[in-house]
């Protein structure tokens, strides 16, 4: 072997060693993106709502399952039917350290012209579950059941006051408005008070300030089991199980009304594929856990997990369907 050949071999060996050292010094590139500071879980309602309960449970899973390598906090940003929270999210564009609990109201508020931001301005990350809407009255209310409510509203659309969180046209409102509409009631004449959270709406119900509150079954469960409220209808295709087994559906009471609300995760606009992939991995892990599955069963939540790509497609279809429904309900924005 001549001197030139020896020199060439030595040079190649040096380059190989250099490449190995560099590869070993760049684990972040190999592993992809992950949080390196506190993660904020943003809630678009006040404490005590279904959104808030979901967010705090997910934060608990982050900690217990060690899914996030940093700290995490729940931040409530109520107001504007979610407009404040989603506006806050987009103050942190392309930052994967912010995720928000989303629901159908992200779509309905935009359709109704109540919010400038919808899913297309943000980064859809996951659909987690669906839950049906229940209709509650105070335990000692004179409203006997769903049929009685429909009869009163048909006789006088202003005779009952409804408390709705957090905006008109959202799934909570739909859970009673659909039944009224199908029964021939002009829903535009109904007296509706809008609250910043489901918890606040129920408090107003217990205080006698409103007569009826529609809301997610998860929100209603503890109040129903405590005996402070009575559920007169659930907007489900068939009766639920457990503590809801004795509550009739709207269909059983003559109104063809089925309404559910999904809950999911959404990030700021402009998130990178690496950030989205990280949150795909996190949501996949906790939705496969036994702790999550037990929570779904306990709260009558239907497992509807969808990862980010499927979630975007789902929201595209859902937006179109909801626009048609809200137009029928005479609640959609008209130009």
Image (cartoon, rainbow, N blue to C red):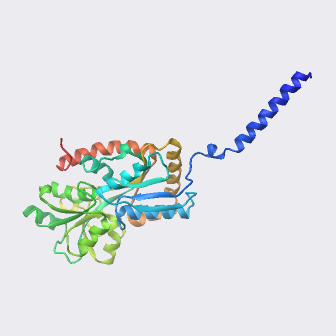
Q: Picture coordinates of residue 106 (x, y %)?
A: 33, 51
Left or right position of 40 against 21: left
The residue nearer to you, when weighing 211 against 154, is 211
- Compared to residue 274, the image places residue 260 above or below, namely below
The residue nearer to you, when weighing 126 against 121, is 121
| Rendered residue at 29%/56% (across/down) | 81
The residue nearer to you, when weighing 158 against 40, is 40
Quarter of the figure with residue 187: bottom left
Left or right position of 142 against 127: left
- Compared to residue 330, the image places residue 195 above or below, namely below
Q: Picture coordinates of residue 225 (x, y %)?
A: 33, 75
Q: How many numbered tags mark residues here?
A: 0
Quarter of the figure with residue 257: bottom left
| Rendered residue at 36%/69% (across/down) | 242
Residue furthest to the front in view is 91
Q: Picture coordinates of residue 1 (x, y %)?
A: 92, 23
Left or right position of 18 against 190: right
| Rendered residue at 27%/67% (across/down) | 201
| Rendered residue at 51%/41% (across/down) | 273
Specify the quadrant that holds the C terminus: top left
């Amino acid at each position: 072997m001549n001197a030139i050949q020896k020199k060439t071999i030595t040079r190649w060996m040096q380059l190989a060693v250099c490449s190995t050292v560099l590869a070993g010094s760049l684990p972040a590139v190999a592993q992809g993106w992950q949080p390196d500071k506190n993660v904020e879980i943003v809630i678009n309602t006040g404490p005590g709502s279904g959104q808030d309960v979901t967010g705090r449970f997910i934060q608990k899973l982050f900690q217990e399952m060690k899914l996030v390598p940093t700290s995490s906090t729940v931040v409530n940003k109520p107001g504007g039917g979610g407009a404040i929270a989603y506006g806050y999210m987009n103050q942190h564009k392309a930052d994967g350290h912010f995720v928000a609990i989303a629901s159908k109201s992200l779509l309905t508020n935009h359709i109704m012209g109540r919010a400038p931001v919808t899913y297309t301005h943000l980064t859809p990350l996951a659909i987690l579950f669906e839950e049906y809407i229940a209709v509650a009255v105070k335990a000692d209310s004179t409203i006997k059941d769903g049929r009685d409510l429909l009869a009163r509203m048909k006789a006088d659309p202003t005779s009952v006051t409804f408390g709705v969180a957090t905006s008109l046209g959202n799934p909570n409102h739909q859970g009673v408005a659909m039944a009224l509409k199908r029964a021939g009631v002009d829903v535009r004449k109904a007296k509706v008070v809008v609250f910043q959270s489901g918890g606040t709406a129920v408090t107003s119900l217990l205080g006698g300030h409103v007569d009826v509150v529609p809301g997610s079954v998860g929100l209603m469960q503890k109040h129903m089991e405590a005996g402070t409220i009575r559920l007169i209808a659930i907007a489900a295709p068939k009766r639920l199980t457990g503590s809801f087994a004795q509550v009739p559906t709207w269909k059983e009471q003559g109104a063809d009304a089925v309404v559910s609300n999904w809950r999911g995760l959404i990030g700021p606009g402009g998130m990178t594929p690496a950030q989205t992939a990280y949150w795909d991995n996190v949501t996949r892990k906790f939705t496969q856990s036994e702790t999550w599955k037990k929570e779904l069963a306990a709260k009558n939540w239907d497992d509807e997990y969808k990862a980010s790509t499927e979630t975007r497609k789902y929201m595209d279809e859902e937006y179109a369907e909801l626009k048609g429904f809200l137009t029928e309900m005479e609640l959609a924005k008209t130009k």
